[in-house]
Image: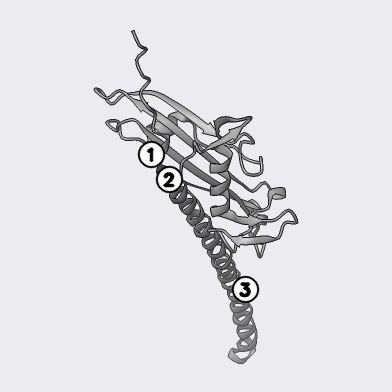
Amino acid sequence: MKRQFAKPLKRKNKGQSLVELTLILTVLLTLLVGMVEFGNLLNQYINVVDGTREGARFGSNDDPFAIIMVNNVPTPNYEIFFAKIYTVVEGHYDVNGVQRSKGAINPIVLNKDNGDDIVVSFFSVATDGATGALTSIERFESAAGSRYNNQTSRFTDGQISARMDGLAPSTGVLLVEVFYHYYQILRLYSFIGVPDPILVHTYSVMPLSAAEPTPTPNPAP
């Protein structure tokens, strides 16, 4: 009797082991794919974060109120300021789309057709010198709104003022945002609801002394 049941039991054990191995391999492969996919996403996210930081550092030492002559009239040109930051972040491209200089996000290349964009804003924030209370905040943006006119700033004036110290004096603030759509390289996680592409939004905030509001002079008596 023992010999009659030995073979069926052995086959049953083999089938059970195969099922268990299949389940374990499925879990291990899922984890491996996740490590590859999200590891690559994290690497690109760090590059984009570095890009916003470099753009903000550069812009914080520049003057957004650079004066140019328009019809023999001195006129501040914010677009020059914005264009410099775009170049620091993304690099410089000629009219044919050939990259002539590398930006801080290199080797990532923004694709305007995919909705990628760079948004730069700066603010003049005025506070009451005695109480430190916010009295006004003025936002300055590119005439086009952004580098490729695909995105708008995710920050309201109230969110910018909330990030400031309540006792801080009047100051200028620079905000650099980058929007980048990451396409999955294995595209397996899109089947479980993870969007493809994944929108990566990073930002950096820096003080901008050149945008500090100046007191309005009292009119002459």
Q: Quadrant of residue 184?
A: bottom right
**N-term mark: 1 or 2:** 2
- Marks 3,2: beta carbons within 8 A: no
Residue at position x 55%, y 48% from top?
84
Looking at this view, is 70 or 199 the one in front? 70
Dot placed on the residue nearer the N-terminal end, 3 or 2? 3
| Residue behind mark 1 | 209
Residue at 28% across / 26% down in the picture? 132
- Label 1: how many Cα within 10 Å (few below 14, some 14–19, many 20+): some
Quadrant for the N terminus, please. Answer: bottom right
Seen at 59% across and 81% down, the residue is 13
Q: Residue furthest front?
A: 72
The numbered mark at residue 60 is 2
Are the two marked residues, 3 and 1, in contact with CB atoms closer than 8 angstroms?
A: no
Q: Quadrant of residue 71?
A: top right
Q: In x, y percent, where is residue 68?
A: 56, 37
Find the distance from the CA under tag 3 to the CA under tag 1.
62 Å
Give the farthest residue toward the top: 221
Residue 52, position as x, y percentages in the image:
50, 51
Q: Nearer the viewer, mark 3 or mark 2?
A: 2
Mark 3: secondary structure: helix
Residue labelled with disc 3: 22
Measured Cα–Cα span from mark 1 to mark 2: 7 Å
Query: Circles 1 and 2: CB distance less than 8 Å?
Result: yes
Of 29 and 190, nearer the camera is 190
- Pinpoint residue 60: horizontal percent, then vertical percent: 43, 45
The amino acid pointed to by label 1 is Ser
Residue 137 left/right relative to 120: left
Identify the image quadrant of the C terminus: top left
Give the amino acid type for the residue marked by disc 2 in the picture.
Ser
SS category of the residue bearing label 1: helix
Relative to 146, does residue 184 appear above or below in the rendering? below
